Amino acid sequence: MFFILFLLPFTLLVYNYIIYPLFLNPLIALHLPGPFHYKLSKLFILNKFRKEQGNLAIDDLHKKYGPIVQIAPNHVSFNNIEILKKIYLHGNYPKEYSNSSSSFSPDKTGFYSNFGNFGERNLFSTGNSKKHITLKKKLSKLYSKTFVISKQQDIQEKINNVVELILENRGEPINVYSLFSSMAMDVVSGFEFGYEGDNSTDFIKKSTHTSVGVNGRLESQYNVFQSFRDSSSMWFYVTCLPSLYEIMCKISGLDKSIQLGRDWIWEHLQKCIDNKNKNETTMINSLPESYTLPQIGSEIADHILAGHETTGITLSYICWELSRPSNIYLQQELIKELKENETLFTIENKINYAEIDKLPLLHAIIQEAGRLHAAIPGIEPRFVPSDKQLIINDGAIIIPSGTMVSCQPYSIHRNPKIFDPSGEYHVNSFYPERWLQFENETEAEYQKRIRNMERNMMNFGQGNRMCLGMHLALIEMKACLASIYGTSNNVHSKISPEWCPHIANDSKVAKMGYSDMPINSKASDNYDIYHKLSDIDKMRMADSYTTRPLFDECWLTFE
Ligand code: HEM
């Protein structure tokens, strides 16, 4: 009895937290840089993730220890582009991609496996490399640049609803976070279910993006979106502690809200399956015929979530950046660029998507937002497969199979040597100029610098698991910005003073997480403090795997 109650648990604790990490763990012999206590237990880094301080904590560790840091007994974080390429590109699927254990797979890290829906895994959450690449090849056509451009008219109809709403509410505060999330949902739902009939959603029109709520506080109502956000807010349990996910949903009281979004997708899917046009190229028509309804639902739910949140968040950050007093010159330059290319807009307010894609400043703005406000700034873990090692510095360091390895876009995107070689454009500030040709730079030098920056971008991931919807997101965002600030609307945006009476005039800095803040949630009892925060604080990025504006809102006024 004594053995079972005391000696066994004690022995297990000693083994797990002392004997294994200090004497048996193959990583310990490598003497990798990193805090000693992080090598004893993964609880330390998990606790940072739980408190939504993980991205900044890992970034700080890299600043202190360099590009290689052991952040848990079995997890090494890297902040180096050559190692990144080895993890995410080289040594990834072998040619025949027949042996799933031979790739640096996200499986076994457990991080992705619970992103399934309706009891089924999907492209994003499967760890089986063969299944993954076969399905990805099948679905790539739907999201190819050529196909996205061919859907220009359908996409533009949704975007025109945004412009209409902005014009109808000139001079009034608009929650662009809600508006752009709705727009991205309306667009991506067309790709999933089809644009014909009412299969694609109409959230721009059906939701409220402008109302003033209780206590003069600006609010907007859209329950399905709230449900998806509540779901995303549980990311820590989904990725790091899936066994506690259900119980934590209940304890936090979010279970009902999260269920609402799931129910909505399921009901919408069933309706669309009945109404689908078999000849339209959509996700429901592109999936293998053998797929069951839960398998289709799992894939579609993932794309709906991945497609609307990331795009809505990125557009919100872009428009906020363009509306800040310190960046207003960029908004004026963009309007000028669009005006000079008026021929790209036809009289029906349609835009030539292929041409709009080539506008240099518009492109630079999108790139800079992807760098500074990457919608997925957190770690993208992979697993060194059983028959491979990660060989670094010509064999000076050999990371053994079974180790979890990762890079995080937040840190990769803030390397001053790559993104601020001249020392003029701070890496933590929004400077699209860094993506344009400098005055004293030759064309060849410029191309070399841009290629190097592009190589170091991870906002859509890297390698075989790279974002499937990248072309859709990029074209949609460009078309949306061109439609708002271009054409004959004569629209300018500013930060709504009703939402933020304290606008920072001279700072360009961007911030992440709650650190140094007198507040750690937007609960109503904090409202007085919240109201006094500057726009920089109100637009802090959440420190999580996928980010969002920390307080879930961004109010701009268009004039
Ligand atoms: C600005 C917008 C977007 C950003 C920043 C973004 C970012 C990313 C990133 C970083 C990944 C890789 C994540 C990882 O490995 O941990 C990813 C994967 C994925 N994204 Fe996006 N995404 C965006 C828009 C979209 C859209 C519009 C769709 C449309 C359906 C989409 C669908 C997907 C899918 C299906 C995957 C999984 C790909 C795979 O595992 O092979 N994303 N995205």
Image: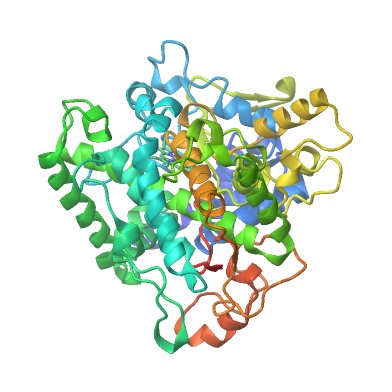
Viewer-side residue, 104 vs 123: 123
* 539 to 364, vertically: above or below: below
Which residue is rendered at x = 74% and y = 63% of the image? Answer: 326
Q: Is residue 152 above or below residue 49?
A: above
Residue at image location 49% in from the left, 74% down from the top: 172
Task: Say whether residue 318 is left or right of residue 479.
Answer: right
In this rendered view, identify the residue nearer to me: 386 or 79.
79
Which residue extends farthest top? 96
Q: Is residue 386 visible?
A: yes
Q: Is residue 416 left or right of residue 268?
A: right
Asked whether residue 22 appears in the rendered view, the answer is no
Ligand 1 shows up in the quarter that is top left
Residue at coordinates 58% horizontally, 78% vertically from top-left? 519
Which quarter shows the C terminus? Answer: bottom right
**Percent coordinates x, y for residue 115 in the rendering:** 35, 45
- Spot the residue most to the right: 440
**Image quadrant containing the N terminus:** bottom left
367 horizontally vs 187: left or right: right
Count of numbered labels shown in the rendering: 0
Q: Position of residue 551 (x, y in %)?
A: 51, 69
The single residue placed furthest to the left in the displayed view is: 274
Question: Residue 170 location, x and y as percent?
Answer: 49, 69
Q: Position of residue 52 (x, y in %)?
A: 54, 62
Determine which quarter of the picture holds residue 287.
Answer: top left
Position above or below: 444 against 26: above
How is the protein colored in the picture? rainbow
